[in-house]
Amino acid sequence: MSELTTVPKAIGGPSNFLDERLGAGNFLKRNLRKVFPDHWSFLLGEIALYSFVILLLTGTFLTFWFKPSMAEIAYDGSYAPLKGVMMSQAYASSLELSFDVRGGLLMRQMHHWAALMFVAGMTVHALRVFFTGAYRKPRELNWLIGVGLLTLALLEGLTGYSLPDDLLSGAGLRITEGVAISLPLVGTYVTFFLFGGEYPGEDVVSRFYSLHILLIPGIILALVSAHMVLMWTQKHTQMPGKNRNNHNVVGAPFYPAFMAKAGAYFLFTFAVVAGLATFAQINPIWLFGPYTPADVSAGSQPDFYMGFLEGALRIMVPWEINLFGTSHAGTLPLSVIIPALVPMGIIMTGLALYPFLERWVTGDKREHHFAERPRNNPHRTAIGMTAITFYGVLWLLGANDEISANFHISLNVTTYAGRVLIFLAPALAYLITYRICLGLQRYDAGVVSHGVESGVIKRLPHGEYIELHTPPHEDIEAHVRGKEPVLMLPAAPDSAGIPPKGMRGPLGKLRARMSKAYGGEKIPLGDGHAHGEGHEEEEHAAIGAGDDHSLTR
Amino acid sequence: MTDNEHEIEQPDERVPRRVIGTPAPGTSMLGAPEREDVEVEIPGVTLQDEQKARKAEKIVALCFTVTFLAAIAFIISYVYFQVGSPESTGVSNLALGSTLTVALLGLAVGIVIWVRMIMPKYSLVQERHPMVSAEETRGVVAETFIQGANESGFVKRKLLRRTLLLAAAPLGLLPVVLLRDLDNSKMPGAAFNKTLRHTVWGEKTKDGKPRRLVVEGTGQPIRAADFNSPGGILSVVPDGYQHDLNALAKATLILIKFRPEEIKSGTNQNWTHDGIVAYSKICTHVGCPAALYEQTTHHILCPCHQSTFDAADGAKVIFGPAARPLPQLPITVDGEGFLVAKGDFNVPPGPSYWERGDAEAEARSKGGQA
């Protein structure tokens, strides 16, 4: 095996051609060895990215056979139980795609599984970014792009889910119609425009088709590209650790290591999607039959990412008001509008505004390139868990019929429980998470000042037993010491007793109070045994049982 | 990371010299790499043990071979397994899917082993720079902007500026106007409410007779005398509209047979026939068909969001998010004893909407029962 000493002609020639025309050499000189920090949680977003690529590939395949038409035809394909049944061309072509095209069923199932992975990947990625504060300056714009992408992904899922025009997808469409028509003032217009007249009409599948395969994926593609470019330019955040600081980035180079890893990760994602499509059936449309507004199958469930909206619709109380009396327009079906708009509004608006609200509260205008450990910003982590619990309760209640059937609980009880839990559980989650974060901070303080348990028990001359503690590994210690207090606004009044500008008035006072609660060092790490800079190796922190309470308090 | 920590933070050291040199004129842009002894340690790059790497190479080669074989197997499966029936499609799906999965997995595992056991371990350091541009640059940009704005005359020439804005405003409206015909029925907005209020039950048949109720699916008309077991339930559609989805979306019924003493005051007795009651099957919440019926309790349940209606008592809501009862359809029998509609619903069926108003209260005030 010899090693390269010159660039091979096959690469050198074309590179030269390109460089003379594009000047790509300058870019590559700077970027071929761009450093990417390494942490498993930094790869979650890539699941979404690769799922999107798989969606484009499999989706293009599907378009070659799918016919987005609601014209009624008698089915004449090879699936015997539906032979001769009247159905839309969309459904018939979905069946053809499944039964008469080799690999068609595999591609259809891969497309569906990849869609679920796409949204799931985005969700966990967004959570990682949120909990580590990686949305902070200078990355707020990329965070906003991400929120936009998540919203578009839900829309993309909704339009795609409706295309096969089977009984299940029709149930989803009917609910979409019921929600759209409930909107105040514009509801009937929106519905008649969307469906080309009365529901269901003959247009919605072809309209959703052009949205689903062209408009929305086009925007997603553009935003994903922008997301990548920003990430590339701003460089990735890193976890605190040895030799790492806010002004550097430590990791593996793009070429060859990160490139190969990313390629392997794409293949893994692809393999998992293919494996799921092979062994886990999804959306067997031939079992549901063609859509008719007169029928629905029990246990109709949307895809998982719509579950929270479904749950909100289910636990809502039956409120409806007529603003201007009986015979006039002005009907507000709150039992539809509230669950359809409020949870989604809270979550998406909350996500979009959080970086700016946090900055307003902390007054932190610095650049941040460390991924903060969730415990070190306990209020943010608690708020995040509150949102997750809120979403989770709704999501669970979206399947309350399944819960009721499988756990033998009365259906009505699940709904009543949901109505209470939607308020109670998030509040509890806040309190519990906050306490856990403080506990973990206390544990960190213990590790830094007293070391870690060595497992060695020592008996002292007077009979007392103690456990020896050893200093933590330097990587771990550096990781723990990466903690920074959350910034607080300077709220102290000046010598004349006047609070600083922006802290007066009711809003200013609220801001000051929030800042005081949100910011600051909750549990200081402490310097313990003045053990630092690694020159006191001989000092083993041996602590007696009496001292040890600090670790378990 | 030993004693050369300061050195490695030099920007030049970010890129190990072994790999990339300065592009020389006339050569490829990658240039001729400076040859460096492999033994010389490059900061942040820890080479793998050659013996282990050699072992790993064999495993990687095995993985890649698996991919090669699986890909061939995929092609063979495609040719060999035909589709057509659910069974044969299942077999084809299994064969194609598993070979594809194995092919992708082999490549993925191979590359991971390659990265982890053959490529060096990296801990390279790069500097970050603040995103903000230099003060001087910003100043130049600001000056350029001002200069350009003045040169263009946009600031000085009011007429130009104002007419440009004037021109832009209606142009922005064009796409909105163009979308008006999205509603193919092209009815004026005021007519939406009217359309939603009426169903085909209000229309007589071509020969002027009231419209018959037929069983969904079979299209059989229903003889009242034959639908006689109390607790019986049928899903019913209007005769002549069995395949008209627009009509079905509003007019589908659920037909229930009661013992006369079971019917409570909420149900309009004049609209029933011999204990047979017809309700709209379209849920008043968001429009799912309320398809489930519990005989013992007379509960109609919508499977989508579990709104529950008491069929014996005018289908009033007893549970769930629906705010209004399912509208009742007035029915009777024709000369041949078949069930027919006496007229349309007196309130709009299906989900609520802005223009609907409290149609139930309105109907009551007109002396009817809703």
Image: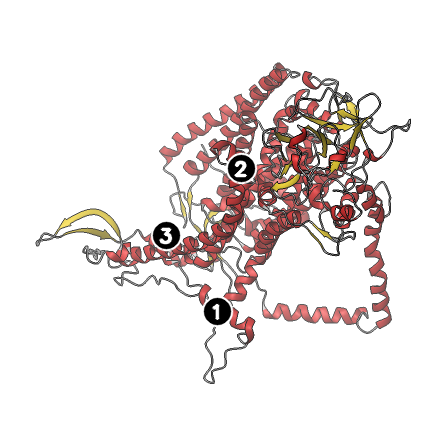
- How many circles with numbers are drawn on the protein? 3
Q: Describe the element under mark 2 as helix, strand or loop.
A: helix
Q: Please give the label number shown on residue A483.
A: none
Give amino acid for label 2. Answer: Leu
Which mark lies nearer to you, 2 or 3? 2
Among all residues in the image, which is located at the extreme bottom? Answer: A496
Residue B197 shown left or right of residue A512 in the figure: right
Separation of residues labelled 2 and 1 (CA atoms):
43 Å
Residue A9 in view: no
Query: Label 3 belongs to which residue?
Result: B1
Among all residues in the image, which is located at the extreme right? Answer: B207
Separation of residues labelled 2 and 3 (CA atoms):
62 Å
Quadrant showing the C terminus of chain A: bottom left
Task: Provide the chain ID for the residue under circle 1.
Answer: A
Among all residues in the image, which is located at the extreme left? Answer: A461
Separation of residues labelled 1 and 3 (CA atoms):
45 Å
Q: Describe the element under mark 1 as helix, strand or loop.
A: helix
Residue A22, image x and y in percent?
A: 67, 49
Query: Label 1 belongs to which residue?
Result: A513
